[in-house]
Amino acid sequence: MGDREPVDRQGALYVHGGHALMVGCAVDNPPHSHYNASVLLASGAPFLFRHGDGAWQESSGLCVAPCVEQQLRTRDAGVLIMQVDPDGRAFQHFGGRFVASPVIELSAAERAEILAGLPAGPWQGRAAAAFFCHAVTVLGRNAPHPGARDPRVVSVCRMLAEQLEQPPSLAVLAEAVSLSVSRLQHLVKAELGLPLGHYLLWLRVRDTVRRAQYGSSLTEAALAAGFADSAHFSRTFRRMFGLPPSSVLKQHNQVRVEILSSASAGGCNEPG
């Protein structure tokens, strides 16, 4: 690695649209499942990982498909954790890899090439965005395209995102795309990997985090995103990420949180 600094002395979480990059944080979380794809990369000691009811495996680099129950234990703070929103263009670069398996071991060559893109100096917003884009580019080489999403599912997802506080009923959504309710439910599960209700919760979690990071109180943010109260949001967040929301929503000594604007993202114009 030469004189590169693999992580900050203080952990940092960079959020850009539906994507995120966490560096400099030791992790030991309970089983959880979330909508994003995960890229886990060790710049120091290998980490331990398992999915579903499987055995623990040691690894230095993995890609994990969306909606996979998983658990991570790191031995140091040198593991980089990327969360890639399947609704964004970045996922199109490498999402086709999951056709073979929901968990893909990265080759030594891929890990080395991705780590070569670590910033030479301290982490900051533009450097984090550049690393994210570099990693996605490496992962996408020779990866099959995951395929276009059904336009009816795209329309339904857009309708939900635009009406989070009072989302349309299943009947209204189904009528809007000329499907029966049962056919819409089946199509959404096949396309997204999770039921429509769980996808709506993911949209609300993402919106609550965005609002809280821009200054709203947790209660205000949760209510504006459509949660019954902040406790409902907290339970949902913990179930999805295996962490309490306070671990990423509060500026404290362990984790520095930075929301990246399109301008600070520089050459990475993939907003999610």
Image: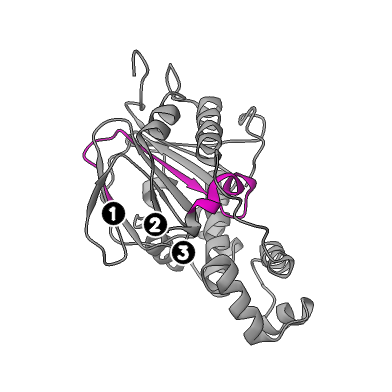
Q: How many neighbours does mark 1 have within 10 angstroms: few (below 14), some (14-19), or many (20 or more)? A: some
- Does residue 75 show up magenta in the picture? yes
Q: Which dot marks residue 241?
A: 2
Cα–Cα span, label 1 and label 3: 18 Å
Choose the circle earlier in sequence order: 1 or 3: 1
**Callout 3 amino acid:** Phe
Q: How many neighbours does mark 3 have within 10 angstroms: few (below 14), some (14-19), or many (20 or more)? A: many
Left or right: 51 with respect to 122? left
- Does residue 81 show up magenta in the picture? yes
Q: Quadrant of the N terminus?
A: top left
Q: Is residue 256 above or below residue 156?
A: above
- Colour scheme of the rendered structure: one colour
Q: Which dot marks residue 233?
A: 3
Badge nearest the viewer, 3 or 2? 2
**Callout 1 amino acid:** Asn
Q: Nearer the viewer, residue 107 or 226?
A: 107
Cα–Cα span, label 3 and label 2: 12 Å
Q: Which residue range is magenta in the image?
A: 72-97
Q: Which dot marks residue 29?
A: 1
Q: Secondary structure at mark 3?
A: helix
Q: Residue at (37%, 17%) from the top-left corner?
A: 4
Choose the circle earlier in sequence order: 3 or 2: 3
Choose the circle earlier in sequence order: 1 or 2: 1
